[in-house]
Image: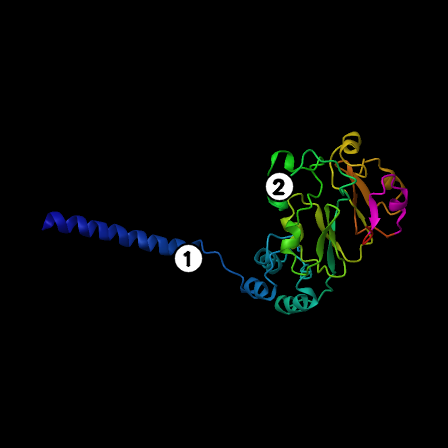
Amino acid sequence: MKEILLPALAMGGVGLVLGILLAVASKIFAVEKDERAEEIAQILPGANCGSCGFAGCSAYASAISAGTAKINECSPGGQNAADRIAEIMGVSGEAVEEKRAAVLCKGTIENAAEKYEYIGVQDCVAASRLQGGGAKACSYGCLGYGSCIKVCSNNAIKIENGIAVIDMEKCGGCGECAAVCPKKLIKIIPKSAKYVVKCQSCDKGAQMKEKCSVGCIGCKICEKNCPADAIKVENNHAVIDYGKCISCGLCAEKCPKKIIELIGAN
């Protein structure tokens, strides 16, 4: 009996000690949860669209409770969500800046060259996994197979002449289309923005001309003429800083490729 009892008691003792150590460790190293984060997460729409700049609603709620994010960045939640979050955080309410999506590509069937004829699933994500990122010669351009359409809850997107086009009146700025686009050329911008650069290519000018007749060539004419220093050429294409832009339209007027357009113009 001793040969059986002693090992059993020893194992039981070891288990007891380990259990006590684990219990003590859980108390010492416990991470306190901020209940406000959970309350805020319940207020947010749960779309996990990323328009706030975070990976999802839960991450955004945690950032707000930690004081590292503004309370008014959720476009789908709108002003109502921002006001309720302000109450939880005990701060003054902040106005929500409405947002909308913009497709930064003008590579229509006539404008953009193709490397081959694509015959397959009509889905941008699937097509982008092929060699070279799809049939379009410009590896940064819209593939036009409508992955964005499938996730748009407002029915605000359609394919016209080979590229996605957004109905600005219907768009709610949720960011679901931007999240699914494999080329990352759909951007969420302030609703107050008037102009967009409809090209995201990082190719140099000479290369761009071979692939798309209207692509940005990084000439910096827009940059040199902007009175507000609101547009810069980065990675061979123009980028607008909407915090500085005064919507004068001079960049669009001077652009030799006419790739900078008034929002809503096709």
Q: Nearer the viewer, residue 24 or 123?
A: 123
Query: Three-letter amino acid code at disc 1?
Result: Lys
Label 1 Cα neighbours within 10 Å, binned few <14 / some 14-19 / many ≥20? few
Q: Which residue carries the number 2 mark?
A: 127
Taking the spot 87% from the left edge, 46% from the top edge, the residue there is: 252
- Please, what secondary structure does the residue beneath circle 1 have? helix
Label 2 Cα neighbours within 10 Å, binned few <14 / some 14-19 / many ≥20? many
Regarding residue 50, the answer to whether it shows in the image is no
Residue 173 position in % (x across, y down): 70, 58
Q: Quadrant of residue 200?
A: top right
Pick out the residue farthest to the left.
1
Q: Which residue carries the number 1 mark?
A: 27
Taking the spot 70% from the left edge, 49% from the top edge, the residue there is: 186
Q: Quadrant of residue 231?
A: top right
Q: Give the answer, above or below, for where 211 lies relative to 27.
A: above
Q: Earlier in the sequence, mark 2 or mark 1?
A: 1
Query: Three-letter amino acid code at disc 2?
Result: Ala
Magenta stretch in the rendered image = 248-262
